[in-house]
Image (cartoon, rainbow, N blue to C red):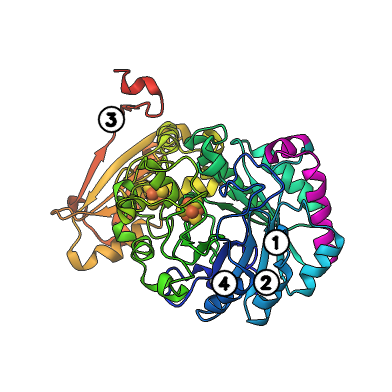
């Protein structure tokens, strides 16, 4: 199987919304779990879900998935290893040609288990590791000793020849937390990382610290880390990463749409309900009564999520709605209809299609607008364009952004007519060019190009331009002395054969520089009320 930045998966992950079947399915095979994670979207624990699918029904689910294609099926929970038949389910999926994977806390994953998973054809295991600090991880997961077992599980999976990925849920918008987990993972030989951004669901309704702007900065920092590291690092459930990557000039043709829910991804709940994603527990149908292909291809909910033109609010106006799409779960949360425990029972909004297509309230981007970083760049450009070999790098350093991002933002500002052009102003006297003049020549139409080419051969000419005027060709001349200026002009007239009577010499007698600056990025410049 071809590996992509998604950790496990074929390059077709990027084929948004293709009918036929999903590329990735997350399957909560059980709600039982030995941990008590603060953020658990499934609100899992000691008790099994009422009506959990039996082994025979699980096989039927696999048959239904196999009839739509060969998706990657991630067995998750709860803790998938709490199911006694998990190896049978994995093996059955492998035999039916599905790409079987697992998402686990690692708490129950010892050496023998890793070997049994490999023998069942499981290709890859994602182990949750939220912090490089054992106490922090254990406190987040609600049980002591989880960190140690997670690290051991990574080693067991690696030794059993399984692909390993680390799933990290960020608890606060601090890059160092992510860096430390990646450093730990690298020391264990892991090259795949999925960095999950918090969504308020299940027990995660008390989200981590920080506001959307701070998380936006963290997404950018994670993307820059991805670009520099050569590791597979993907911000997850932060669909804005596609916009932020675009602004920063970071590309990856293997990336799918920012939010994959119902596009190339869905979740199967323990009882067979199919929802667009685990954090969006709106059921589109139950596999006990409706075939998977019918739900995937024809459910009104899935069709609504697949159509970017149905997005409303700022997501609907946004040029990134195709690439990003906004988090539909957060959009729904904004509708204020979410029950306290989303996944312990499914959400049944009155107007599911209307509510899931609202704007993502977590995105600070204003489509068509300019943000604080744009204003800082515009401010920096007003000061001066540094006379260095890489002026954008100098501007980037001044405003604290990456070079590529500055260039991408300037392009966007230009496209949206905020920035018309950036042109250098040469103060010729500072270069020792004390004499300057503007020359206008009356040149016959059919000779303008030829004469302009001669004029441009002189280093004393900074630029020339054509005008719809009796005097058709204009250019500026600057030289250290008036004598040199006159000599150059005389030579140009002689070489071009333009008579002196057809030349206007509009000498600069006195120069004024009017320096008008508008401090754009300072709060005070807008007034406070
Ligand atoms: S709806 Fe939100 S949480 Fe669900 S897949 Fe999309 S981005 Fe992730
Ligand atoms: S406004 Fe919506 S579509 Fe645009 S970047 Fe933000 S979340 Fe994505």
**Cα–Cα gap, marks 1 and 2:** 10 Å
Where residue 327 sits in the image (x, y, percent)? 44, 50
**Cα–Cα gap, marks 2 and 4:** 26 Å
Q: Of the residues under marks 4 and 1, which one precedes in the sequence?
A: 4
- Disc 3: which residue: 509
> Which part of the image, by quadrant, shows the C terminus?
top left
Where residue 402 sits in the image (x, y, percent)? 56, 44
Query: Circles 2 and 4: CB distance less than 8 Å?
Result: no
**Would you say the beta carbon of the disc 3 residue lies within 8 angstroms of ligand 2?**
no
Mark 3 packing: few (<14 Cα in 10 Å), some, or many (20+)? Answer: few
Mark 3, secondary structure of its residue:
loop
Query: Circles 4 and 3: CB distance less than 8 Å?
Result: no
**Cα–Cα gap, marks 3 and 1:** 90 Å
**Cα–Cα gap, marks 3 and 2:** 89 Å
Query: Circles 1 and 2: CB distance less than 8 Å?
Result: yes
Span of residues in magenta: 135-161
Circle 2 or circle 4, nearest the eye = 2
Mark 4 packing: few (<14 Cα in 10 Å), some, or many (20+)? Answer: some
Where residue 179 sits in the image (x, y, percent)? 70, 43
Mark 4, secondary structure of its residue:
helix
Q: Is residue 393 visible?
A: no
- Disc 4: which residue: 11
Mark 1 packing: few (<14 Cα in 10 Å), some, or many (20+)? Answer: some
């Amino acid at each position: 199987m071809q590996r992509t930045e998604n950790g496990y998966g074929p390059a077709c992950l990027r084929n948004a919304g293709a009918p036929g079947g999903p590329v990735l399915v997350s399957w909560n095979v059980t709600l039982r779990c030995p941990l008590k994670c603060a953020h658990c979207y499934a609100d899992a624990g000691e008790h099994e879900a009422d009506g959990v699918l039996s082994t025979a029904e699980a096989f039927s689910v696999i048959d239904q998935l196999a009839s739509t294609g060969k998706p990657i099926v991630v067995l998750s929970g709860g803790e998938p290893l709490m199911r006694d038949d998990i190896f049978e389910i994995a093996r059955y999926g492998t035999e039916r040609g599905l790409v079987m994977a697992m998402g686990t806390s690692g708490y129950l994953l010892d050496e023998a288990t890793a070997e049994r998973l490999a023998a069942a054809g499981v290709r890859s295991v994602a182990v949750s590791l939220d912090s490089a600090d054992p106490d922090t991880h254990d406190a987040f997961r609600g049980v002591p000793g989880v960190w140690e077992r997670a690290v051991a599980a990574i080693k067991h999976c690696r030794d059993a020849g399984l692909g390993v990925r680390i799933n990290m849920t960020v608890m606060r918008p601090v890059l160092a937390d992510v860096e430390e987990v990646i450093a730990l993972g690298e020391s264990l030989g892991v090259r795949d990382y999925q960095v999950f951004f918090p969504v308020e669901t299940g027990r995660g309704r008390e989200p981590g610290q920080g506001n959307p702007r701070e998380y936006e900065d963290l997404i950018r920092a994670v993307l820059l880390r991805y670009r520099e590291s050569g590791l597979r690092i993907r911000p997850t459930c932060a669909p804005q990463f596609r916009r932020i990557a675009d602004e920063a000039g970071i590309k990856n043709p293997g990336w799918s749409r920012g939010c994959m829910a119902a596009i190339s991804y869905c979740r199967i709940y323990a009882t067979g309900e199919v929802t667009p994603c685990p954090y969006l527990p709106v059921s589109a149908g139950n596999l006990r009564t409706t075939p998977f292909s019918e739900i995937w291809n024809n459910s009104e909910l899935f069709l609504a999520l697949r159509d970017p033109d149905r997005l409303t609010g700022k997501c609907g106006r946004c040029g990134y709605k195709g690439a990003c799409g906004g988090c539909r779960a957060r959009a729904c949360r904004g509708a204020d209809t979410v029950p306290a425990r989303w996944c312990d029972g499914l959400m049944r909004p009155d107007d599911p299609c209307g509510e899931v297509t609202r704007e993502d309230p977590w995105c600070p981007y204003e489509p068509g607008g300019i943000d604080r970083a744009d204003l800082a760049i515009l401010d920096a450009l007003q000061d001066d364009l540094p006379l260095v070999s890489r002026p954008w790098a100098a501007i980037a350093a001044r405003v604290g952004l990456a070079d590529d991002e500055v260039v991408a933002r300037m392009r966007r500002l230009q496209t949206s007519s905020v920035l018309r052009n950036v042109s250098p102003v040469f103060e010729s006297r500072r270069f020792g060019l004390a004499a300057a003049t503007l020359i206008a020549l009356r040149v016959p139409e059919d000779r303008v190009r030829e004469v302009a080419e001669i004029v441009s051969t002189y280093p004393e000419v900074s630029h020339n331009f054509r005008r719809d005027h009796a005097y058709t060709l204009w250019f500026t001349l600057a030289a250290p002395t008036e004598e040199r200026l006159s000599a150059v002009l005389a030579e140009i007239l002689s070489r071009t054969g333009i008579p002196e009577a057809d030349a206007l010499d509009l000498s600069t007698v006195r120069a004024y520089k009017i320096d008008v600056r508008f401090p754009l990025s300072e709060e005070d410049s807008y007034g406070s009320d």
